[in-house]
Amino acid sequence: MPFVSDDPSWWPLINELYGFSYFVVAASATVIYDWALTFGQEFELIWMQRWSCMTLLYISVRYIGILYAVINILPSLPSLPVTDIVSVPHQNLSFPFNNVHCYGGVSDIVGQLVGYNDRNRCHSLNSTLNWMTVIVNTMLGVIMITRLYAMYQRSRKILIFLVVIFVAFTIACEVVTAIGDVYMLGEELILSGTYQCIYEWQGDISLDSMSWVLYITWEVLALCLAVWITVKHFRELRRSSTGQAFGDCFMVLMKTHVLYFVSFAVVSSFQLSHYSPNLKTKALETGTLMYTAHLEIYSIVQMFVLGPRLILSIREYHAKLVDNSDAGTGISTIAFREHGYVSTGGDV
């Protein structure tokens, strides 16, 4: 049951959350717009090609992203209820806006309100989004492993190395997410006819940030491995007759990889800074809300716009290569060998 109040002291908070909701809607709209913009390529390069593991990963990341965008909007629309409207006794729950500027104020609100409905729909939506993020990041990790496996000429050693590390990191992140569901408190407020979801993490901040440290470690490792093998092959292929096409393929791989990594680095910097005690103590102030809003946009673009392009860019390059070749020579699997490359029909 939501907390209902028409107290004018909440109006400044309502205005702040209205501004935040615009950024959330913009972030979600970006995912839909990118999908519409690239659907022609997607239809030709994904749906009309022979299906493979990479095809399923692309479709999963792309359409989970669209679903995420829709769900993400729901708790951010002040005019849209996400739970049943039931007025509850709140004569003892008066929280003027100047008291909720601080993180402790949010804790007081959530701590008292959560007793009305311990697992409300606001909490369920937040939990759903968190687990969707974990699932998509796992898929993006599999895509990255596949790219590195191909770049390292299908080396079993590098595959085992990457899989072992990634599985360990993924399990750790899933454990942190599961614990986070327990320590995340949330409640819906109906303030002057507007619907607001507020949340607070009541666990250890270091635990909450651990998953991001693991993700950063993984991405840095993947980037270093990609850069190293690219530099090595460019040196080896200067004397190779297939060096031009081979080098162009590596350039496509590295451009998308570096762009993806830069976006991930930006998101990680924002996310880790978000755990700062200075921001946590001013959770509902304008500056902090705008900071969180930008983080929302960057993280969604990184996962659901640049993520699918890790596959789409290679498919597009392969299609252009086939169009420019009378023999139809391709690199659809980007499966490289020591003195050349082979194509086995569309795994990437």
Image (spheres, grey):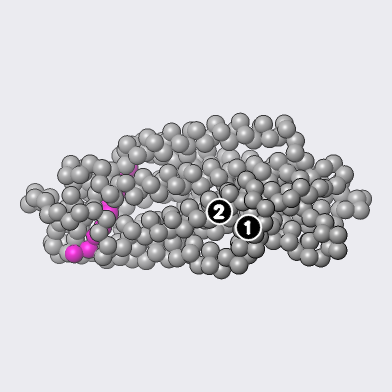
Q: Quadrant of residue 46?
A: bottom right
Tell whether position 53 is magenta.
no
Tell whether position 197 is magenta.
yes
Q: Residue at x 18, y 49 (%)?
A: 1
Picture coordinates of residue 294 (x, y %)?
A: 44, 59
- Disc 1 marks which residue? 46
Label of residue 177 in the image: none
Q: Quadrant of residue 228?
A: top right
Picture coordinates of residue 185 (x, y %)?
A: 28, 43
Q: Residue at x 55, y 45 (%)?
A: 139
> In the structure shown, which secondary structural element does the residue marked by tag 2 occupy?
helix
Instruction: Characterize the local packing of mark 2: few (<14), some (14-19) or many (20 or more) Cα atoms within 10 angstroms.
Output: some
Magenta residue span: 193-201
Q: Residue at x 71, y 51 (%)?
A: 346
Q: Residue at x 14, y 58 (%)?
A: 5
* Gap between marks 1 and 2 measured at Cα: 8 Å
Question: In the shown orientation, is residue 19 left or right of residue 104?
Answer: right
- Disc 2 marks which residue? 59
Picture coordinates of residue 44 (x, y %)?
A: 65, 63
Instruction: Characterize the local packing of mark 1: few (<14), some (14-19) or many (20 or more) Cα atoms within 10 angstroms.
Output: many
Picture coordinates of residue 163 (x, y %)?
A: 62, 34
Q: Depth check: 62 or 213 in front?
A: 62
Question: In the shown orientation, is residue 14 left or right of residue 320?
Answer: left
Which secondary structure class fits the magenta region best? Answer: strand
The amino acid marked with disc number 2 is Ile
Residue 36 higher or lower than 86, as above or below = below
The amino acid marked with disc number 1 is Ile
Question: In the shown orientation, is residue 189 left or right of residue 329?
Answer: left
Quick check: can you spot residue 81? yes
